[in-house]
Amino acid sequence: MVSNSILTITLNPALDVTTDLDQLKPQQKLRCGPPRYDPGGGGVNVSRAIKEFGGESHAFVAIAGATGQWYRRILDETGIESEAWEFRGETRFALTVMEQVSGLQYRFMLPGPEQDEQEAERLLAALTQTMGSRYRFVVASGSLPPGLPHDFYARLAVRVREAGAALILDTSGPALKATLAQRPYLIKIDHIEAQELAMGSENARLSIPALAQKLIDQRVAETIIITIGDKGAIVAGGGQVLHVQAPAVEVISAVGAGDSFMGALTLGLADGWSLEDASRFGVAAAASAVTTQATALCERAATHQLFEQTTATRITQTDG
């Protein structure tokens, strides 16, 4: 798997800092273990997953300030082909702390640097130039930094279409809803987001497969993937609805599962796999990711092993 036809976009990256301690206690100075630093953010994590599988992608990352330069150095060490767009302000940190006594994980997410409408226009122009006509798939993953308009990904979707590429979107909230008017190629959402998008009281009792079909009928995207935790995912598109069943694994950390899913899925599609097989590969990668510590993503050998245990079932009844 060596496809290089994938562009990933990360507009609100975070320098991930991971550590552990014995127990969280208020009003005390807490001594933590040695920190681990990773270049985080949806699109970059997708590129990291693709790299793990021996594939190639180009990562477009918006960075800011001294933290952004630190982030860029760590990203360069991964060997991922990347380019940086420099925002004003300071790239955010994200802190993950593992409490040893309970085994619980605590995640602290800081806001990204504030931007504005003028910056949005400059950014769109830069992304348009980067895309050219070189990519088959553009993965826009993660949140928007404060100040960028909610319809930024919708505007991007127009540029992606004009470049002859397919937009794969993994975001939430107003940014997701605004983009659906442009009917991206693929969106990944969870069950709650699916219900919010379908709206209407008549949809409240729909099964998840029926909900996926409802959204396809509403033409919000060509392909819809609804993740359902340890049960895998419902995949709708191409005239079919599938349940991709996840293999049973011991969950250590859920961090990175969604991005691992997106990396494996996109690489499979870029290499000409069917939607069914690419989705199975995505679910296997997510299952691998939850067995790793902290912010670590999927592992290649484990994913391929789990892929053999991942099944897809065609669903013929989707009306409730």
Image: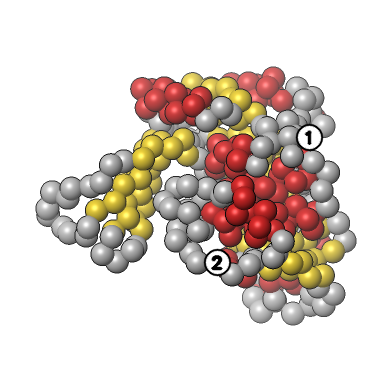
Q: Amino acid at mark 1?
A: Arg
Answer with mark 2 or mark 1, whichever residue precedes in sequence. 1
73 or 132: nearer the viewer: 73
Tell me the SS state at disc 1: loop
Q: Outermost residue, right direction? A: 239
As displayed, is residue 163 above or below residue 227?
A: above
Image vertical order of residue 107 relative to residue 145, above or below: below
Q: Secondary structure at mark 2?
A: loop
On residue 84, which mark appears?
none
Q: Nearer the viewer, residue 236 or 232?
A: 232
- Quadrant of residue 139 in the image? top right
> Percent x, y for residue 160?
74, 33
| Residue where numbered disc 2 is placed | 249
The amino acid marked with disc number 2 is Val
- Please indicate whether residue 88 sits to the left or right of residue 306 in the image: left
Quadrant housing the C terminus: bottom right
- Write the residue at 74% across / 67% down: 311
Label 1 belongs to which residue? 136
Q: Label 2 neighbourhood size at 10 Å, few (<14), some (14-19), many (20+)?
A: few
Tally of numbered tags: 2
Farthest left residue in view: 28
Foreground residue among 256 and 222? 256
Question: What percent of the width, then of the height, locates residue 17?
Answer: 36, 41
In the displayed structure, 62 sits above or below 310; it is above
Residue 299 pos. (x, y %) = 57, 49
Q: Quadrant of the N terminus?
A: top right
- Quarter occupied by residue 47: top right
